[in-house]
Image (cartoon, rainbow, N blue to C red):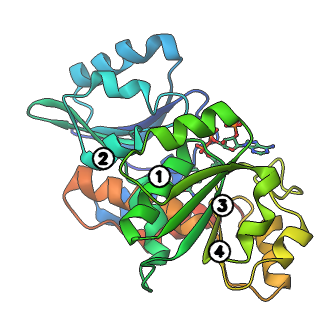
Amino acid sequence: MTRPLITGNTALLGVIGYPVQHSLSPTMHNAALQELGLDWVYLPFPVPPAQLAAAVAGFAAMGVRGFNVTIPHKQAILAYLSEVSPLARTVGAVNTVKWTETGWSGTNTDIVGFLAPLRDRDWAGAVAVVLGSGGAARAVVAGCADLGFGEIWVVGRDPDKLTQFVASWPSLKGLRAVPWSELRPLLAQADLLVNTTPLGMHPQAKTSPVTGQDLDQVQKALVYDLVYAPRLTQLLQQARARGLRTQDGLSMLVQQGAAALSWWTGQPAPAATMERAVLEFLGGG
Ligand code: NAP
């Protein structure tokens, strides 16, 4: 990719996190901005938690158009927003912020990203098993609720966190949380199995959240790994070896970025260009 030409009019977007060096968003968004022919750039900003207020005030003072938010600021950013979308409120986390007439407005595009590859079938009444109970699991549960899943089982290792997780969705009747020891019997009924843990993600690429014996129980589930580096994770390899359908995390990454970019710019985002940029950066996946 050639570097963008910076002019006196260049508008600024970015991502805040701590650390933020690992983020693929600058690569993905700058490729898209060039494709769109916009005089905008997208930069990474490592913002320590104690500097979040100063960073957000500074962005407003400097006319930053919008920014993505990653760990550890996805909840803390809520305190600095004048408006929060209902989806982001449900999830309790914001990953995209835009400057508006009334101040900073926040939303969560992870749900749109997660749902993108699932839209081709009817999931009403289906059974989802979600591995992990962190931030991404919340977006996944919101997405599954949106698709009308009848049962959503969240599997986690911290009993207190699991209790809090379920308590935070009082209106979601089909949501249950269980420890890993109870995973195996759930798998035979599952229509969708989603990994939201970092197991399988570089540098833990040789790990999987489940054993082969666990996966032997799966009859019909689509196995969806949110991990995108490597693309073909250990979990997806295990699933393919058993003839199961699989979905990697790349399209979620690209589609959450495309939804953010089109919100900031008011234009459709070039998702194919964004995907190509990420794949080139990752060395072909
Ligand atoms: P997070 O908030 O830190 O949550 C991670 C979850 O995994 C927690 O529930 C954690 O359990 C669990 N976990 C971690 N290590 C584990 C282990 N060894 N055994 C069992 N459980 C373990 O992180 P996140 O933001 O949800 O992200 C999780 C993963 O999803 C990351 O790999 C991230 O890259 C990926 N992701 C991908 C996309 C995409 O666009 N494709 C978007 C978002 C996230 P505890 O709560 O007990 O610590």
Q: In front of the other: label 1 or label 3?
A: 1
Spatial CA span between label 1 and label 3: 16 Å
Say whether disc 2 or disc 1 marks the residue closer to the N-terminus. Answer: 2
Q: Residues within 10 Å of mark 2 (few under 14, many from 20)?
A: many
Instruction: Find disc 3 in the rendering and name its residue.
Output: 228
Q: Is mark 1 within 8 Å of ligand 1?
A: yes
| Residue type beneath disc 4 | Ala
Say whether disc 1 or disc 3 marks the residue closer to the N-terminus. Answer: 1
Of residues 29 and 246, the one nearer the viewer is 246
Instruction: Find disc 1 in the rendering and name its residue.
Output: 139
Q: In front of the other: label 4 or label 3?
A: 4
Q: In front of the other: label 2 or label 1?
A: 1
Ligand 1 rendered quadrant? top right
Instruction: Find disc 2 in the rendering and name its residue.
Output: 40
Spatial CA span between label 4 and label 3: 22 Å
Asked if the residue under mark 1 is in contact with the one under mark 2, i.e. CB atoms within 8 Å, the reply is no
Kind of element beneath mark 3? loop
Q: Residues within 10 Å of mark 4 (few under 14, many from 20)?
A: many
Q: Position of residue 280 (x, y in %)?
A: 63, 65
Q: Is mark 3 within 8 Å of ligand 1?
A: yes
Is 105 left, or right, of 123 in this rendering? Answer: left
Spatial CA span between label 2 and label 1: 29 Å
Kind of element beneath mark 1? helix
Q: Hey, which quadrant is residue 72 in on the image?
A: top right
Spatial CA span between label 3 and label 2: 27 Å
Instruction: Find disc 4 in the rendering and name its residue.
Output: 190
